[in-house]
Image: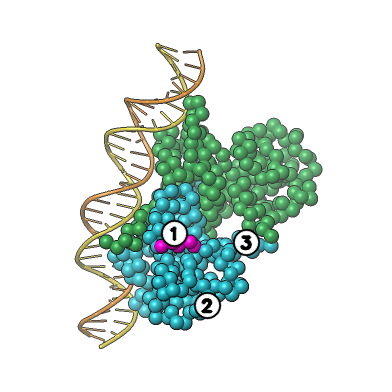
Chain colours: A green, B cyan, C yellow, D orange
Amino acid sequence: MNMERTWKDQLYQEFARIGKCLSSPKRLELLDLLSQGPKSVDQLAKLTGMTVANVSQHLQTLHESRLVRSHKQGNFVIYDIAELSVADFMVSLHRLSEKQLVEVQKLKSEILLNHVSMEPIGLERLLKRMERGEVVLLDVRPEDEYASGHIPGAISIPMEELEKHLASLPADKEIVAYCRGPYCLMSAQAVEILKSKGIKASRLEEGVHEWKRFVEHSSKF
Amino acid sequence: MNMERTWKDQLYQEFARIGKCLSSPKRLELLDLLSQGPKSVDQLAKLTGMTVANVSQHLQTLHESRLVRSHKQGNFVIYDIAELSVADFMVSLHRLSEKQLVEVQKLKSEILLNHVSMEPIGLERLLKRMERGEVVLLDVRPEDEYASGHIPGAISIPMEELEKHLASLPADKEIVAYCRGPYCLMSAQAVEILKSKGIKASRLEEGVHEWKRFVEHSSKF
DNA sequence: TAACTATTCAATAAAACAATTGAATATTTG
DNA sequence: CAAATATTCAATTGTTTTATTGAATAGTTA
């Protein structure tokens, strides 16, 4: 049988291994969560609403395709994305999905209508205004996610502690809140809380990886 | 039941629709071929070694996820990628697969060992040498693929016509051949033919989309 | 060492998928 | 209008995949 054909078949078989990882909604959610920082199996189970056994199984699939890696820490097994490029690839997938599938666009806009008059600020404008000291960037993700990577200049106040720490925010400046990315609602909730306290606030749709891609694509010279 | 949970489930369901398209080797091969230019169903069937019915089925899956589009032309249905970004996404997938899966690296290097002493030229060096007029870039894909997009400055001689048209090549310059990309072997075969005729030649691994990405990432200023 | 916790393993049942076949449709050509 | 061609449809089969359950393992703490 044709040599070249079998070679191609094997090659595409391999590409499809990565593809198979992306064919389950739950696995995609796991990859997104791990993109924000390492997590244990039952942390992931709680965040996704899956059973632990189920999560473990999915993680092994991802592991076999080298998209995640793990190490043992005491009783826990901590999973992490295998490479930064995996997170970047997830951004590509989100972008493509949003561009091609109206359903994604619909879902996104529909949820933001629930969160009143939320015109998001763009990355470019945000960075300019931060330079001029006009706004404060607020990272509302859990502390450990902030610790494993955040947009430079952002301060960290996890969602649950936001109401307690309102005082520590500069009263005169506008607040821009961000979280895990375009499909995470924490920042939207944060903005609502801030607004309800009379603080001027807006939402940054992008997360760390979207930011990273932005600076890489715009700062070449 | 939790509002946010159902929203996320729907959203990731949609992302996974794109993922499912990428979970079959044959569908990936179809996407790669269509990235090079529009093709009819049985053209694709011949190129991939599948039955026509099977190809048609896969194409419909891809169509439902808006990764390809089609129009009727006489008796034929011509399929095409829906967006340039689909081709770019495929490049991302290839890159990620090659980075994470040793199997892909192995398959790639093993086939290039069959093609004698084939040190490929890099894009950067190629473009410089083209500017200086030291090399001629040769596109060995079928004419219509060249017509629907090629690296600027390249001349088109489809693989099958190469031996006939050897005379039309400048005798004093080195030839660099390219084809559909890193996983297409036409350019390697072309180089072998050229070398056997005593013409100095080397292979460019990259195809049109890899080139496009290269210039977009390096020419920002 | 015993109890406890986090994770994985193994077996199962239900659902989704892929390849195959032959028939049906639509368009073109003689 | 009949024959030919390209594609799609529909039904079938065998294979993979997913979620679920309960048991097994490995490491920790009392």
Point out which mark residue A127 bears: none
- Residue at the location (70% across, 42% down)? A154
Indicate left or right for B193 with A176 as reference.
Answer: left
- Residue at the location (52% across, 48% down)? A86
Point out which mark residue B65 bears: 1
Magenta extent? B116-120
Indicate left or right for A42 with A158 as reference.
Answer: left
Which residue is tagged 2?
Answer: B172
Is disc 2 placed on a helix, strand or loop? Answer: loop
Which amino acid type is shown beneath numbered disc 2? Asp
Residue A164's place in the image compared with B48, above or below, is above
Residue D7 % position (x, y): 34, 70
Residue B108's place in the image compared with C4, above or below, is below
Is disc 3 placed on a helix, strand or loop? Answer: helix
Q: Are marks 3 and 2 in contact (CB under 8 Å)?
A: no
Residue A188 % position (x, y): 63, 45
Among numbered discs 1 and 2, the one appearing first in the sequence: 1
Which amino acid type is shown beneath numbered disc 1? Ser
Q: Is residue A119 visible?
A: no
C-alpha separation, residue under disc 3 versus residue under disc 2: 31 Å
Name the chain letter of the residue that bears numbered label 1: B
Instruction: Please tell me whether residue B117 belongs to the stretch shown in magenta.
Output: yes
Which residue is tagged 3?
Answer: B218
User: In which quadrant of the rendered view does residue B184 lie?
Assistant: bottom left
Q: Nearer the viewer, mark 1 or mark 2?
A: 2
Viewer-nearest residue: A144 or B187: B187
| Total tally of numbered discs in the picture | 3
